[in-house]
């Protein structure tokens, strides 16, 4: 009987560990491989508060001689990381999972290098990290006068939420859709130039 219980306990432990395990770590960032060519940012074995300081999510990452595009951020990946002060999200990230940035109260800056890519990120019922930082930087410059690029056709859900430093927004004719809460609580906003096709 003791042997059966021991085997069951070991099997359960292995199952739980596999739920939270990450596939590899590079430069202090934990990743799961999601396909032959892509990976997602995740937490350290499912633990909250896995990250602190400034974190730069790259466009791609090398592991064991192979290059993976970093295309998503896992559910709860940065959850509870109260000492996370700055996050840069690479241009290949297309999806941010549930609760990815919940309780990141110390977050002061959110950075992107590609505004078109930023507009297309799907925040899956998850607070955009700008909810905590109240700002967005493009190539290390605080965005105050936002001009949506001409190649953007849709601005995603919560894309610029709580960006309190935004003063003006210019949306071109190519934009046909603006997601829910895309500009909610942008309290510094003074003027919006809206394209004719929204």
Image (cartoon, rainbow, N blue to C red):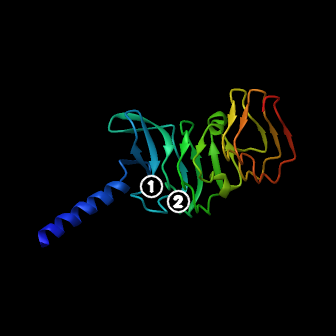
Name which residue lies at 70% across and 46% down. Answer: 180
User: Separation of disc 1 and disc 2 at Cα?
Assistant: 8 Å
In the picture provided, is 163 more to the left or to the right than 111?
right
Indicate which disc residue 57 carries. Answer: none
Query: Which quadrant holds residue 121?
Result: top right
Where in the figure is residue 166, as x and y percent of width and height?
79, 47
Query: Which quadrant holds residue 16?
Result: bottom left
Where in the figure is residue 174, as x and y percent of width and height?
74, 27
User: Farthest residue toward the front?
Assistant: 1
Q: Secondary structure at mark 2?
A: loop
In the picture provided, is 178 more to the left or to the right than 6?
right
Camera-side residue of 37 and 179: 179
Camera-side residue of 4 and 170: 4
Q: Which residue is mark 2?
A: 79
Query: Which quadrant holds residue 151?
Result: top right
Indicate which disc residue 43 carries. Answer: 1
For marks 1 and 2, the one nearer the N-term is 1
User: Farthest residue toward the right?
Assistant: 190
The C terminus: image quadrant: top right
């Amino acid at each position: 009987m003791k042997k059966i219980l021991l085997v069951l306990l070991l099997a359960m432990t292995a199952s739980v560990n596999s739920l939270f395990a990450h596939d590899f770590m590079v430069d202090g960032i934990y990743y799961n491989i999601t396909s032959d060519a892509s990976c997602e940012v995740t937490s350290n074995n499912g633990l909250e508060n896995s990250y602190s300081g400034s974190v730069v999510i790259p466009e791609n990452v090398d592991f064991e001689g192979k290059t993976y595009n970093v295309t998503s951020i896992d559910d709860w990946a940065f959850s509870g990381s109260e000492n996370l002060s700055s996050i840069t999200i690479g241009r290949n990230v297309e999806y941010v999972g549930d609760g990815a940035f919940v309780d990141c109260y110390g977050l002061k800056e959110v950075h992107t290098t590609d505004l078109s890519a930023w507009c297309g990120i799907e925040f899956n019922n998850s607070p955009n990290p700008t909810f905590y930082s109240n700002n967005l930087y493009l190539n290390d410059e605080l965005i105050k006068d936002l001009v949506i690029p001409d190649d953007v056709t849709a601005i995603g859900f919560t894309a610029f939420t709580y960006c309190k430093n935004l003063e003006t927004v210019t949306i071109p004719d190519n934009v046909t859709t603006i997601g829910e809460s895309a500009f909610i609580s942008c309290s510094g906003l003074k003027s919006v130039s809206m394209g004719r096709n929204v």
